[in-house]
Image (spheres, rainbow, N blue to C red):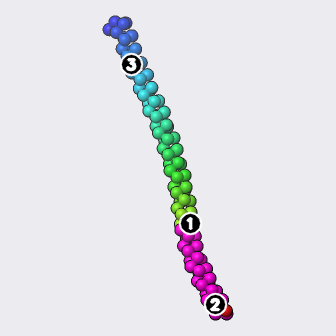
């Protein structure tokens, strides 16, 4: 074989090896980016779940307070009526 052919083969092999190295390095970087992105998404979902839990607890407490308020209103009306009846009886 002649020198230019050998030089061409060596150049082609070197180019292929460089492309393989670049491809492997690019794939590693992409995998690291995906892993970081996945960690960020997981963190944000956890935060959202926590906020939803707090919100749902607040809604439940608010509902309970509304029920208690209605019961208290009914009791107050009952007491007021009874007082009116007693005042009428005294007159």
Label 1: few (<14), some (14–19) or many (≥20) C-alpha neighbours in 10 Å: few
Residue 90: quadrant of the picture: bottom right
Q: Can you tell which mark lies on residue 13?
A: 3
Q: Nearer the viewer, residue 37 or 11?
A: 37
In the rendered view, does 19 fall on the left or right side of 66?
A: left
| First in residue order: circle 1 vs circle 3 | 3
Residue 20 locus on image (x, y percent)? 41, 26
Residue 22: x %, y % from top left: 45, 26
Residue drawn at (61%, 89%), measured in percent from left and top? 85
As rendered, which of 44 and 81 lies closer to the eye?
81
The reply to whether the C-beta atoms of the residues labelled 1 and 3 are less than 8 Å apart is: no
Q: Residue at x 48, y 44 (%)?
A: 38
In this view, the mark in front (2 or 3): 2
Report the Cα–Cα distance between label 2 and label 1. 39 Å
- The Cα atoms of the two marked residues, 1 and 3, are separated by 73 Å
Residue 8 in the figure: left or right of residue 40: left
Q: Is residue 74 magenta?
A: yes
Q: Which residue is mark 1?
A: 62
Q: Residue at x 60, y 84 (%)?
A: 81
Find residue 1 and report its image quarter: top left
Q: Which residue is mark 2?
A: 88
Q: From the viewer's perspective, tell me whether residue 66 is left or right of residue 30.
A: right
Residue 22 drawn above or below residue 71: above
Gap between marks 2 and 3, in whole Å? Answer: 111 Å
Q: Residue at x 56, y 59 (%)?
A: 54
Q: Position of residue 61 (x, y in %)?
A: 56, 67
Residue 71 among magenta residues: yes
């Amino acid at each position: 074989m002649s020198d230019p052919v050998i030089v061409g083969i060596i150049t082609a092999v070197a180019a292929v090896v460089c492309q393989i190295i670049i491809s492997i390095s690019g794939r590693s970087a992409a995998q690291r980016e995906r892993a970081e992105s996945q960690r960020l998404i997981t963190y944000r979902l956890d935060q959202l779940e926590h906020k939803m839990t707090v919100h749902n607890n607040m809604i439940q407490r608010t509902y309970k307070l509304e029920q208690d308020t209605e019961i208290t209103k009914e009791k107050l009306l009952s007491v007021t009526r009874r007082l009116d009846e007693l005042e009428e009886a005294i007159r």
